[in-house]
Image (cartoon, grey):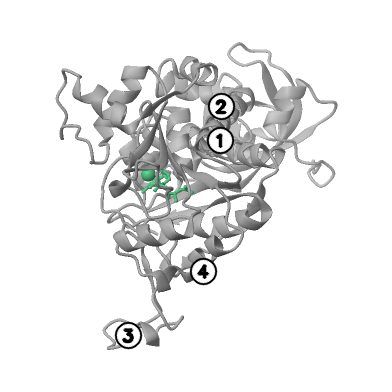
Amino acid sequence: MDLSSKLTRAKIKNLFEAGQAAGPVLVQGWVRTRRDAKALSFVEINDGSSLANLQSVIEEDSPAYAVIKDLTTGAAVSLIGLFGPSLGSGQRFELKCLSAEIIGPAGLDYPLQKKRHTDEYLREIAHLRPRTNKFGALTRLRSQCAWAAHDFFRQRGFYHVHTPIVTGSDCEGAGEAFRVTTLPDGQNAGPEDDFFGRKAWLTVSGQLEAEMLALALDRVYVFGPAFRAENSNTSRHAAEFWMIEPEASFFDLNDDMLLAEDFIKYLVNQALNEGQADLELFDRFVEKGLIARLENLIKSNYVRVTYAEAIKRLAALPQSFERPPTYGADLASDHEKALCEIFGGPVFVYDYPSAIKPFYMRLSDDSKTVAAMDLLVPRVGELIGGSQREERLNVLLDRMSSCGLKTEDYWWYIDSRRWGSVPHSGFGLGFERFLMMLTGVNNIRDVCAFPRTPNNLEF
Ligand code: 4AD
Ligand code: MG
């Protein structure tokens, strides 16, 4: 029976939502398991549209039976059958299979046999782990959150902009940018012989260019990749990650923190509404109580403390840290975690000493601190870094010189403060870190499909 040419493909998610289908349906996907019973065979298939598999029942006297007999976990199949309520227990619906075709076989050496695999093992087969429940769920949640981010900013009048990936300036000034060059190895040539006739890097942040756009379009946001050659082999740093960076004119640090808080709540709320089944998987297997924690994240107001107050609160704790909390030093990750514990949830730390922050942050009236904020969240630590930008030309020039930056390297940035400069602010949210917070997954290597970390670039 060749019905496939006449049938449109049905997605499993839509079938489950509809609960029944009039007439035969065509389903295509990958076999998760097959088991045989007396005069029957059961095949569970997944087509990426939902966490739940579709169980297909094949009776011994059906012509599909001979085909099914050769099916193994991992194979790709096309099934035609009648979809409706299941006769058996354990699942609500099933497909009574009328015909089957193997599209892509998989032998018994398929590395993802039905059992739970460790995160470490799955990292070694990054090309296959999208086929696991966990990665399927992550990928769907990631996609939903990306859509939600676009919705959020569009509703608020922000334009989506694309800033360069190859750049001539280091936004964060931390010297962690990857060089981009076309000069062959071992050739005695200088930057002037290189492709751009000068040194170039992969961007660490789209912020500086986004500022130029915000100073004309009022409100913009970047959603793009960022690259950092931080040699910190930690569970929350990747060499390549995605950042969401809104930038808004006539916007101060307080507006910035309000926007950041609304944004997190919006994304989490969308995920709870649209990705519930996928989140339940993480609640069951990764972090017990995850959904309750996320619901709290929407309800609570995020605490705000100055950096000075944060250091005081940390110093007053009885616990000892790897490095004692001291005024004038960056917060370490155990400090960040402790602050979230003290306040029982996300915490904005703001007004950092200027000496530990980049040149573009707005100097406060005390001349010692800058209008910077970080949002720290439980389990992950720093999720967002943002600031009000220095809009005053003279103050900016002073700051650049005390940071040791050459004004000729940033002439265009300085120009923007010469004409029509306005108070403006923005932040960057690390998308992978957000996904760690959302799913309870505690290693950044397990929230990106193909993580790039020191000494790890398999393909
Ligand atoms: O705090 P950062 O360095 O801020 C900036 O880059 C600003 N220019 C953003 C802005 O104001 N437009 O980075 C922002 C966020 C961090 O809070 C963190 O979530 C994430 O980016 N991030 C990383 N995520 C994964 N791996 C890394 N190596 C990361 N470095 C930063
Ligand atoms: Mg930061």
Residue designated by label 1: 255
Q: CA distance from mark 1 to mark 4?
A: 26 Å
* Rendering quarter of residue 54: top right
Q: Are marks 2 and 4 in contact (CB under 8 Å)?
A: no
Instruction: Describe the element under mark 1 as helix, strand or loop.
Output: helix
Q: Residue at x 52, y 24 (%)?
A: 279
Residue designated by label 3: 190
Instruction: Describe the element under mark 2 as helix, strand or loop.
Output: helix
Instruction: Describe the element under mark 4 as helix, strand or loop.
Output: helix
Q: Position of residue 192 (x, y in %)?
A: 38, 86
Q: Earlier in the sequence, mark 3 or mark 1?
A: 3
Q: Position of residue 271 (x, y in %)?
A: 58, 28
**What number is the disc on residue 179?**
none
Residue designated by label 4: 412
Q: Are marks 1 and 4 in contact (CB under 8 Å)?
A: no
Residue designated by label 2: 265
Q: Earlier in the sequence, mark 2 or mark 1?
A: 1
Q: Nearer the viewer, mark 3 or mark 1?
A: 1
Q: Is residue 307 above or below residue 241?
A: above
* Rendering quarter of residue 116: top left
